[in-house]
Amino acid sequence: MYVNRYPREGKFERYGGQFVPEVLMSALEELEHAYTKFRDDPGFRKELDAYLREFAGRPTPLFFAKQLSNKLGVKIYLKREDLVHGGAHKLNNTLGQALLAKKMHKERVIAETGAGQHGLATAIAAVALGLKPEIYMGAVDMERQRLNVFRMKLLGAKVHPVESGSKTLKDAINEALRDWVTNVETTYYLLGSVVGPHPYPMIVRDFQRIIGMETKEQILEKEGRLPDAMIACVGGGSNAIGMFYDFLDDDVSMYGIEAGGEGIETGKHAAPLVAGTEGVLHGAFSYVLQDKYGQISTTHSISAGLDYPGVGPEHSFLKIKERIKYDYVTDDEALDAFKLLTETEGIMPALESAHAIAYACKMAEEMTEEEIIVINLSGRGDKDVMIVAEKMGIKI
Amino acid sequence: MRIADKFQELSEKGEGALIVYVTAGDPSLFLTKNIVKALEEAGADMIELGLPFSDPIADGPTIQAASERALKAGMNPDVYFKMTKEIREYTDVPLICLTYYNLVLQRGIGRFMRDCVESGINGIIIPDLPIEEAGQTLSEANKNGVDVILLIAPTSTEERMKIISSAAHGFVYLVSLLGVTGAREELSVIVKDLIGKVRRVAKRKVPIAVGFGLSSPNHVREVIRSGADGAIVGSAIVNIIAKNKGEEEKMLREIRGFVAQLKEATLFDG
């Protein structure tokens, strides 16, 4: 009852839409037109599939985490998106959209990035497909993710520091939108999550659906049945929707985990679905963190990739439908989970993904050894070791 | 005075409309009233008063900075409507609220429009609300007699121009270029063609005012000579405010001088 039914006229019931300056309206229409044309084009699919297989490294394994399972007393499977080229699920989307940009004859590609993972994945896809990438990144994020900035530059991307507002992801999106407004005729805006105006939430979801499609096949092969629960972290929500989408009509519980930061009660968090209200940010009507007047709040999370006051409109829709349960874990819990997975399985998760691991630890207490949890391990943690070291009080 | 009446009066006098923008609360809550007074005295025909939003995606660096200053000074919708009500007591020019959709939405669209009427605001511009999403806003505004001023961009198709110009109230805000707000050295070369195009496709006669990038009397003159009914200048005035933050007298003097020149340029024989 959910799959392939939305969006309708650009909306997930009341969520989504196109709240953007008039200048962009024809560009969004052009994008939707091009996307619907190429989506079903066998040549496009074939080309993209080849890149996903031979360049990105798909399909990614569904790994049975035996030692963690023993420790928690429940069967834990990890969908290894951390093994995708570039270190996160982001490349699934950037390859798809970069190929679309190429088909649309747009050579210049712009993107926003928070942690740098989407910027990096955009730069990688752009190099692979011969496009010119320019990345907008908040000055604060550039400081805390210096390594990714350097990686992007090595890949030939121009990285524009964003000094406005809170100098993080939200402001990088503002600036990318301003660039697009100015250069709309020559430029493709490669948005990195299921946020923004229609058709982006649909396009990004569709390119990330492969995560769930593979997972379904793999779990049926390994266990002969669907899992009892699935968990993914939610910032904008692209890895979560990609993982969950093909299970929405199945009897599987789903949990989307937001960044609880220092705790919801402190106000220092990034959990719009848990603690926000409805509003319009970056072109879509969705849940958002804001004050009573509608001014967008600044957020906090140990994980730059989740540090965003908005969330994809389809998640708001699935929250209201009570199809997915949205909850949060704190910075400290995510940090503990980072260490736990590293020590028990030899896998260092991204701090984003560590939120999903942390929630599995909590859920496991209520579950039996026969029950199955699938976690989307959306990215690897190499980029986060400096932050982890700092939190542990260790100087490298 | 209503916006349509103002355009009527000016066209009878053989003048184009000078529409100016400042952000309410920039640089301080107190100064905005004096700035508005100076704008009117110097000849502004209509005044856009920005209600600042934390994430203004249609604005360039100048108005972004003004928004930040105003928010820091304590501007919010409650203060804004109180202030405009006071301004309305001593001014007769049409006042136009420029803000982003989320602020309207959070207050409640109906309540926002009622607040506009009660505080003497004649029109509203919401740059991130395209016609497709504007249904409820248009009907609430109509109910309360507030003009919703819609934007047309260089990228708008003829079909969209038709729909927008027939739904527009007050005037059509023609965006002169691809880009965000901000003073530019050169006026976009496509302005004249755009004005002609909107006139041709519009099903009814609606005033057209051109904005984005206009920064000098020459730009204003060119826009009016190209057939526009009005010219909108924002960032160039906000720049004067930003430059003279600490010196009120100098700021007001410079604003008066600049706006008088701009107004001069709207006279057809000027």
Image: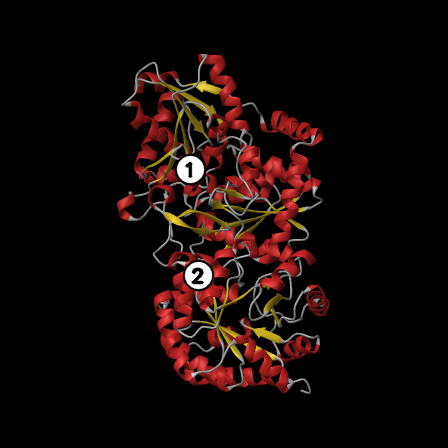
10 Å neighbourhood of mark 2: few (<14), some, or many (≥20)?
Answer: many
Q: Which sits in the foreground, A313 or B256?
A: A313
Residue positioned 50% across, 82% down in the render:
B255
- What residue is disc 1 on? A234
Looking at the image, can residue A339 be seen?
no
Disc 1: host chain = A
Q: Which sits in the foreground, A271 or A353?
A: A271
Circle 2: residue type: Phe
- What residue is disc 2 on? B53
Q: How many marks?
A: 2
* Rendering coords of residue B47 (x, y %): 50, 76
Query: Would you identify the image quadrant in which residue A49 lies?
Result: top right
Residue positioned 70% across, 78% down in the render:
B225
Q: Which sits in the foreground, A93 or A139?
A: A93
Query: Would you identify the image quadrant in which residue B266 lies?
Result: bottom right
Dot 1 falls on a residue whose secondary structure is: loop
* Rendering coords of residue B107 (x, y %): 38, 59
Disc 2: host chain = B
Circle 1: residue type: Val
* Rendering coords of residue A307 (x, y %): 41, 45
Q: Does B29 sit left or right of B237 as displayed?
A: left
Looking at the image, can residue A134 be seen?
yes
Dot 2 falls on a residue whose secondary structure is: loop
Query: Would you identify the image quadrant in which residue A391 lies?
Result: top left
Q: Are marks 2 and 1 in contact (CB under 8 Å)?
A: no
Residue positioned 31% across, 34% down in the render:
A333
* Rendering coords of residue B28 (x, y %): 38, 73
| Looking at the image, residue A253 lies above or below residue A29 | above
